[in-house]
Image (tube, rainbow, N blue to C red):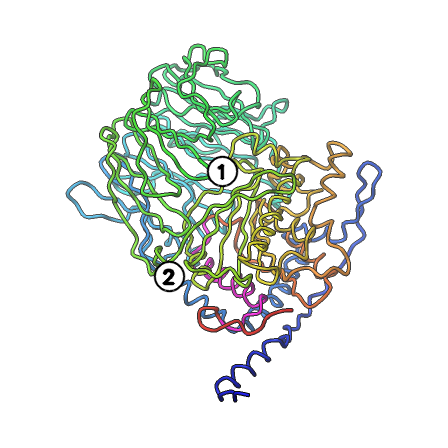
């Protein structure tokens, strides 16, 4: 028999070592008290022992948050390559990023980040002069947690109003400045929420808000959103209510925007996140009355432009994939609409600029852009740089050039200048990043869900990936609120793929990728379709040996956090790691918190009928954590001041998991302080969060070092 070399013996011994289980990190969870709280729904009693955690401002809850973070960060500190991940994230993140330019008055403005700045800075440049800083949000607060959340100029560019968020809150402040001098011109407006700013000439602007709650955010009433008009130089207390505030006509979301020529104010009013009423007001006439365009919420309809009294609207009324119609402002109701761009088999979004309409279609979640004139005649298909997502087609009517962006899962976003008359485009800016897109590939597949529905999924990874079932994989999903997941580059995902990771994104029902019917198929008592689609995506990845249960993590945020929570409680055997972020996790009470009642179009509520209550109870993650079940390693993430999906959802879910989990897998909650739902989060905090998330994920897949630095130390049986 041939003798083994010394090297072969060492390798063989090392292989034997890999069969040994690594000792798990011991975790002692804080004691979470239980209080006898019972609700009765249609004769059924539901215990809610962690109800007290809903008071996110109480001293008891704050103490619980601190105790949980001590345990969580104590665990994360023991992950040997966590700092390596953070360093790599910082290095890859550290490149100049530039937003697409836009013209206001005599200046061209653009957003730029030098690399690791916590917030993007707004720059501007006048023809023949050097660029200068216009607004630097990094100076708004010492810790970088105050962010710029909106910027709107008057038509002549002489004034600007910008919105800021403090600590990630959805509540905004508004500051008005003289653009030329960059000087504040009046007192700051406060307590603005779910709003954009729309100017009426140079004299004032429209904005929306609710009445600010007293004390805890949980007491906020969100059934009376109101549109206000603020006249410059007057106190906010004198602002006029333009729409809303009538008890008999409760609207949760009200918005107002003016036409480019300043002649019209258009008002949308909605009771939920889908469907809106639509009104107009003639601003050229003093004391003009509201004119009704739509007085029901059966469709999503918006005015995209006007040509004199001709109103161009995009709507899914009798057109689930949307179409563009025109009507005269004197008689704008649906029976007078005429098709300009009819509905097609693909979902439509639109932009206007340079005197043209740009119809942006999603073809299996991939962008296709067609340019039309205002009579509905096709001018050309816009040539895009590749297969991916194009955004930003639009500008002012008198601009013959504007900028759009292009990206996909393995291509960092770049900017292109487009000429509306010739159709010529040229690259305006390309990032210089320490990442080579040519080393990676994306493949779109179609798989069968439980009921046979074909669902698309894009899978991205390094070229030459070996399909051996041992690739660390993140399956990311959303599946709700008519929101479409289209290909886009992410620095954090690039770091994941650098480590040999697979990143897979299915376009689940409940989203908007295939229009209104695709959305409806994932709502209310069809919500299980979304979870089934996600489960089937995981099973496809495993069956085709992209990964296996031991190397699969599922991730999603907000409604996607619900997706992860429902999937891991229904199929805890399917994945090794679960990463629910800022999730909607208590489906019996979600509508009682902040803006939650506005989500009933997608979810239904536990109070509307016994059938709906039973359906929600059947998948609500908080109510489906079962004693003695071996759940995957779980890292719940939330912000202590999230006033959209309140942190109580995550607090209660984590408490249930810690009480009932069986086995060695950790169930931790990472609670970011002075943070909200995610928008405006400082770069430094994002890097820390993802170093923790990826570190936790890889460590619980069995890695003792980063995959691109060392082989997997152990294989789980």
Viewer-proximal residue among 100 and 11: 11
Q: How many marks?
A: 2
Taking the magenta stretch, the answer to whether it contains residue 704 is: yes
Rendering coords of residue 259 (x, y %): 37, 24
| Residue furthest out toward the left | 128
The secondary structure type at the circle numbered 2 is helix
Seen at 48% across and 68% down, the residue is: 707
Rendering coords of residue 403 (x, y %): 29, 38
The secondary structure type at the circle numbered 1 is strand
> Does residue 638 show up?
no
| Residue placed under numbered mark 2 in the picture | 92
| Residue placed under numbered mark 1 in the picture | 192
Query: Magenta stretch?
Result: 680-705
Viewer-proximal residue among 601 and 145: 601
Seen at 57% across and 23% down, the residue is: 297
Viewer-proximal residue among 173 and 400: 400
Q: CA distance from mark 1 to mark 2?
A: 36 Å
From this view, report whether residue 558 is shown above or below residue 600: below
Q: Quadrant of residue 416?
A: top left
Taking the magenta stretch, the answer to whether it contains residue 429 is: no
Q: Main secondary structure of the magenta part?
A: helix
**In the image: residue 329, left or right of residue 105:** right
């Amino acid at each position: 028999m041939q003798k083994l070399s010394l090297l072969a013996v060492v390798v063989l011994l090392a292989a034997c070592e890999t069969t040994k289980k690594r000792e798990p990190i011991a975790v002692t969870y804080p004691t979470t008290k239980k209080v006898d709280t019972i609700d009765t729904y249609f004769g059924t009693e539901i215990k809610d022992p962690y109800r007290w955690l809903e008071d996110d401002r109480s001293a008891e809850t704050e103490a619980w948050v601190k105790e949980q973070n001590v345990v969580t960060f104590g665990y994360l500190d023991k992950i040997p390559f966590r700092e390596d991940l953070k360093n790599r994230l910082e290095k890859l993140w550290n490149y100049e990023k530039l937003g697409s330019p836009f013209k206001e008055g005599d200046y061209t403005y653009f957003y730029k980040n030098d690399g690791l700045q916590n917030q993007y800075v707004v720059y501007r440049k006048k023809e023949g002069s050097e660029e200068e800083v216009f607004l630097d949000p990094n100076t708004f607060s010492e810790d970088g947690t105050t962010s710029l959340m909106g910027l709107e100029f008057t038509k002549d560019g002489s004034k600007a109003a910008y919105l800021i968020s403090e600590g990630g809150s959805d509540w905004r402040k508004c500051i008005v400045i003289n653009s030329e001098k960059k000087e504040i011109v009046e007192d700051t407006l406060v307590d603005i929420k779910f709003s954009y700013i729309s100017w009426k000439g140079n004299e004032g602007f429209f904005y929306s808000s609710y009445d600010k709650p007293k004390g805890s955010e949980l007491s906020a009433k969100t059934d009376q959103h109101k549109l206000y008009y603020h006249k410059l130089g007057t106190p906010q207390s004198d602002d006029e209510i333009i729409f809303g505030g009538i008890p008999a006509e409760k609207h949760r979301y009200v918005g107002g925007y003016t036409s480019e020529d300043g002649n019209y104010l258009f008002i949308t009013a909605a009771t939920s996140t889908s469907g809106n009423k639509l009104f107009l007001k003639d601003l050229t006439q003093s004391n003009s009355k509201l004119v009704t365009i739509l007085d029901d919420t059966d469709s999503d309809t918006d005015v995209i432009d006007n040509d004199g009294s001709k109103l161009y609207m995009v709507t899914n009324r009798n057109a689930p994939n949307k179409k563009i119609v025109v009507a005269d402002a004197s008689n704008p109701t649906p029976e007078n609409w005429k098709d300009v761009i009819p509905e097609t088999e693909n979902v439509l979004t639109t932009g206007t600029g340079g005197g043209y309409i740009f119809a942006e279609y999603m073809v299996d979640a991939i962008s296709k852009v067609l340019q039309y004139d205002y009579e509905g005649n096709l001018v050309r298909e816009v040539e895009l740089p590749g297969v991916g997502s194009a955004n930003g087609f639009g500008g002012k009517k008198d601009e013959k050039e504007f900028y759009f962006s292009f990206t996909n899962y393995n291509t960092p976003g770049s900017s292109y200048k487009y000429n509306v008359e010739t159709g010529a485009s040229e690259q305006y800016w390309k990032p210089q990043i320490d990442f080579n897109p040519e080393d990676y590939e994306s493949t779109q597949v179609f798989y069968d869900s439980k009921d046979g529905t074909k669902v698309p999924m894009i899978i991205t990874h390094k070229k030459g990936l070996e399909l051996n079932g041992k690739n660390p994989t993140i399956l990311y999903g959303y599946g709700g609120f008519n929101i479409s997941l289209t290909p886009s580059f992410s620095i954090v995902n690039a770091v994941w793929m650098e480590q040999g990771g697979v990143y897979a994104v299915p376009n689940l029902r409940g989203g908007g990728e295939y229009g209104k019917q695709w959305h409806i198929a994932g709502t209310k008592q069809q919500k299980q379709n979304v979870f089934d689609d996600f489960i089937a995506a995981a099973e496809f990845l495993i069956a085709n040996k992209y990964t296996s249960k031991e190397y699969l993590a599922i991730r999603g945020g907000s409604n996607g956090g619900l997706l992860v929570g429902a999937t891991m409680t229904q199929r805890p055997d399917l994945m090794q790691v679960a990463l629910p972020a800022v999730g909607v996790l208590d489906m019996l009470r979600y509508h009682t918190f902040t803006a939650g009642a506005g989500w009933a179009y997608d979810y239904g509520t536990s109070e509307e009928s016994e059938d709906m209550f039973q359906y929600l109870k059947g998948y609500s993650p908080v109510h489906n954590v079962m004693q003695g079940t071996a759940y995957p390693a779980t890292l719940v993430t939330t912000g202590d001041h999230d006033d959209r999906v309140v942190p109580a959802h995550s607090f209660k879910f984590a408490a249930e998991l810690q009480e009932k989990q069986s086995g060695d897998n950790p169930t931790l909650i990472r609670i970011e302080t002075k943070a909200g739902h995610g928008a405006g989060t400082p770069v430094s905090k994002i890097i820390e969060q993802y170093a923790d998330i990826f570190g936790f994920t890889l460590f619980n897949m069995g890695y003792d070092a980063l995959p691109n630095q060392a082989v997997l130390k152990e294989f789980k049986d």
